[in-house]
Image (cartoon, grey):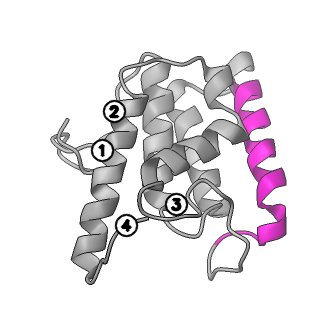
Amino acid sequence: MIPDIKTREELNEWEQTNIIEARRWLFPTRRSPERILCSNFLKKVHRKMFDHVWEWAGRYRKTEKNIGIDPYSISVECKKLSDNARFWLKKKTYDHLELCAQIHQRLTQIHPFANGNGRHARLYVDYLSYSLGQAEFTWGGDGQVSSSGVNS
């Protein structure tokens, strides 16, 4: 765990440093979509993003939040999302952009983790896009900064 954080700014710095490490772990290796589109990899990405910050990084939340589904449904819904995404990819149901948008949208609905869900969903689909041979998203920015706040 992190030593003696006193301010939100210090927490943000620790989280950002951890996310940069996660990006270095993910990129530039291209894993197969089958490997990426599974619940275990979904959790592993979150764990890599926040394992130096939160003890529970990479574990599904167990408490209610004001957003997201009931905690007892998270595991099943993440598996369903992964299964659906592999099916959509195999059957070419959506183009690459729509596939990533569908996954991102459902991940944010599920809200599987206690914190870091938005950053996780963005990095996860950025990496999927990259592994499919496409560019990362700009997420409404000018393209100079990636979804995790790291210069591209």
Kindly report which numbered mark, 1 or 3, lies closer to the viewer in this rendering.
Answer: 1
- Which of the pair 36/48 is nearer the observer? 48
Q: Which residue is mark 2?
A: 24
Circle 1/circle 2 CB separation < 8 Å:
yes
Circle 2/circle 3 CB separation < 8 Å:
no
The CA span between labels 1 and 2 is 6 Å
Query: Hey, what amino acid is under mark 1?
Result: Ile
Question: Residue 33 is drawn in which quadrant?
Answer: top right
SS label for mark 3: helix
The CA span between labels 3 and 4 is 20 Å
Q: Earlier in the sequence, mark 4 or mark 1?
A: 4
Measured as percent of width and height from the top left, residue 56 is found at 59, 63
Q: Which residue is mark 3?
A: 117
Q: Residue at x 17, y 45 (%)?
A: 142
Q: Residue at x 66, y 58 (%)?
A: 59
SS label for mark 4: loop
Q: Which residues are magenta?
A: 68-88
Q: Earlier in the sequence, mark 2 or mark 3?
A: 2
